[in-house]
Amino acid sequence: MPIKLIITDLDGCLNPEESIPWDLDLFHEFSKLCRHAADGAGSIPPITLCTGRPQPYVEALMKIFDIRLPVICEGGAVVYSLHDNHAQYGLGVTEEKILGLRAIRAFLETDILPHYPDLLLQFGKEANLSVFSPRPELFAEIVPLVEQFNREANGPELTIYPSHYYLNISIAGVDKGSALQQLLHQVGVAPEEAAGIGDTEGDLPLRENVAYFACPANARTAIKDVADYVSPYRDLRGLLDILEQPQLRRG
């Protein structure tokens, strides 16, 4: 069955995980591919985004790339459409669970961050939390503290997982896979007609909901082990290489 939609992660795929300038030549090349695909004039089907980043960041990229389909933000907690500027929570997100996440955020701000100057909260999120650190080995110390606080506060069931430089704290059952199911239903594309691109364990739910899955060379081992194709190139160069694979060509 031909692929009708490509869903790609951002950090580690479209751009480096590190806080460094993007390669503008590659960025421009990807932008042209997206715009042609959106017009139905390119060699690949339309592309959309699936990321842990907050909605305002993703909205800006949608305007640059001319992405017209809904995108997934906050690791599946938010689905956003640019054409009507409409954001909705992902399946499984409730007000009660959001209040539980806000309590965890307050705990991080008052009891954790003052003692760990190398940790920073990512701003702009509504139903998900991410802690950044250039020293991700610190996450092993933070996770038990968060879990203990959440138990004592009778908070929501959580899924906590690291990416390269972020510790992501999510509502259990709310992930990129559940949001992708929601998105595919909205746009009328079957999982057998979708392809995914990711690089860390947070992208494993994508693998479970698409027919074809690929990753760049910098992907974690758990991702490479389940990928249909592993590019020999890193980050955006790897993403561009993936988009040249015959499985993703428009039928």
Image (tube, helix red, strand yellow):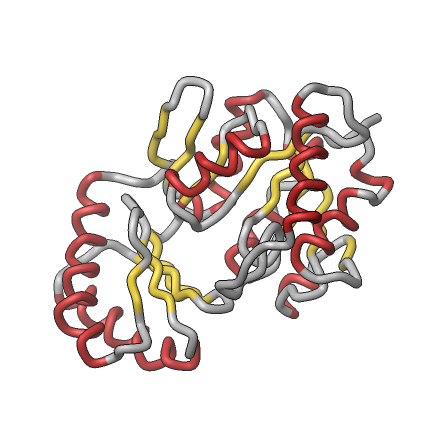
Q: With respect to residue 178, does 149 lie above or below?
A: below
When the figure is inspected, residue 30 is found, relative to residue 140, above or below; the finding is above
In the image, is 214 to the left or to the right of 189?
right
Q: Position of residue 223 (x, y in %)?
A: 64, 62
At x 38%, y 39%, the residue is 55
Badge count: 0
Residue 135 in view here: yes
Q: In the shown orientation, is residue 49 left or right of residue 45?
A: left
Q: Is residue 75 left or right of residue 14?
A: left
Figure check: 8 above or below 165: above
Residue 1 visible in rendering:
no
State the image quarter where residue 170 is shown: bottom left
Q: Position of residue 1 (x, y in %)?
A: 79, 30
The residue depicted at 20 percent of the width and 39 percent of the height is 95
Looking at the picture, does residue 99 appear above or below residue 132?
Answer: above
The quarter of the image holding the C terminus is top right
Farthest right residue in view: 246
Q: Residue at x 86, y 40 (%)?
A: 246
On the rendered structure, is 195 left or right of 143? Answer: right
Name which residue lies at 31% across and 47% down: 125
Nearest to the observer: residue 97 or residue 21? 21
* Image quadrant assignment for residue 131: bottom left
Q: Quadrant of residue 5?
A: top right
Measured as percent of width and height from the top left, residue 234 is found at 70, 62
Front residue of 26/16: it is: 26
Q: Position of residue 149 (x, y in %)?
A: 18, 69
